[in-house]
Amino acid sequence: MKKFPCPVRPSRPFTPPVPSIRLGILGLLAAGLVQAADVPDPSRFAPCVAELKAGALGRGVSAAGYDRLTAGLQPDLKVLELLDYQPEFRTPIWDYLSGLVDDERVADGQGMLVQWRDTLNAVAARYRVDPATVVAVWGVESNFGRNFGNRPLLTSLSTLSCYGRRQAYFRGEFYDALKIVDNGDVKAEQMLGSWAGAFGHTQFMPSTFLRLAVDFDGDGRRDLVGSVPDALASTANFLRKAGWREEQPWGYEVRLPAGFDVTGAGRRNKQPLAEWSARGVRRIDGTPLEGEGSAGLLLPAGPKGPAFLVFRNFDALYAYNAAESYALAIAHLSDRLRGGGPFQTPWPTDDAGLSRAERREVQALLLARGHAIGAVDGMLGDASRAAIRSEQLRLGYSVDGRAGQKLLQALKEGR
Ligand code: CA
């Protein structure tokens, strides 16, 4: 869901606050870093769940279903720490994208395009969203179904309904999650997901599920956990409802003329292409702008990094998870799945980010140096970051726990 402390938008498809938290990319699931200011009282939980019954029934959950699904429910107070977690370290966009759009994910996605070709073609015919875009969402959301999150949804959502800052919002999601199980769409034991309640192949929040999930394989159930066709079609349905237009691109990389005044840049400030053309903006290969309608100038790393013109389809991706970096990851992955290359303008850094393969390489090198960082999984979590800090200190680098190409090279060279 989203980045707290911003308000959680009930319309969001899925949740994670900071994409990196949900995806675990930088291992920011740092419960230990959180200060537990107010210790919640576990004895308040059972009475609270009993009180929530009326609300659930009002939302259409059966009384028998409520009793059955909440019997023995225990709070998971860790999710409250995640609710309040504020990363002190902002992930640079080049790190974020290098982990989400790497050669491995492109190859995996191309495999999925082949494996699910007939389904994707049928989805595209019905919802008018192309296969590469749908598969790109799938790849970023759950790594093509490999990573759903492993927290029991009813536990997390009931906890968040009874404690913490966003109880009203999470009660709605709790009722909707109960309803999904009570309806027989998804089994209770399959309702596993992020701490905030996003679940399944496409990481929908329960409310988004009820609004937009579809039964595409025709078995009578909308199943975003057990059915890839249902998940792919539900994603396309979401994007379609968010305003996706198949005849338009999401956008493309552009080249700005020397001395370009970036005042007025921004996704929301859409201008006719003729306006951008008149100001000297060209496609990155130097050809004139093409496409219809209006576009905003996106400068995700400021005026010195890659620049993009983005159309309303980019806003549809943004609606899926309200972060421009997230939307750009999906957009870029979809281009790569269509055979496109990396961005041509380098990011404004002399220490580029690491792919997941390179993150695993860093972890293997840290292990070889005796750091007890656990399994090599490509996720640079707390233990990896602590080890990185100690290596940075030894190497005389600035000590921030971030691994980029420089640290990888130093470790590879045995420095
Ligand atoms: Ca189905």
Image (cartoon, rainbow, N blue to C red):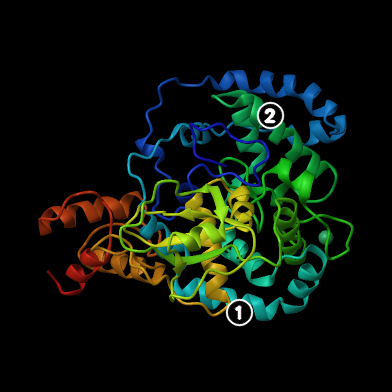
Residue located farthest toward the front when viewing the structure as drawn: 278
Residue 379, given in percent of the width and then of the height, sits at 40, 59
Q: Quadrant of residue 234?
A: bottom right
Q: Quadrant of the C terminus?
A: bottom left
Residue 213, given in percent of the width and then of the height, sits at 77, 52
The residue type indicated by label 1 comes to Gly
Residue at the image position 62 percent from the left and 42 percent from the top: 197
Residue 377: tell me if it is visible: no
SS assignment at label 2: helix
Residue 190: tell me if it is visible: yes
Residue at the image position 48 percent from the left and 37 percent from the top: 82
Question: Which residue is denoted by mark 2 in the rendering?
Answer: 171
Instruction: Name the N-terminal-most of marks 2 and 1.
Output: 1
The residue type indicated by label 2 comes to Arg
- Gap between marks 2 and 1, in whole Å? 39 Å
Question: Which residue is denoted by mark 1 in the rendering?
Answer: 111
Does 253 sit above or below residue 82? below
Q: Residues within 10 Å of mark 1 (few under 14, many from 20)?
A: few
Q: Quadrant of the N terminus?
A: top right
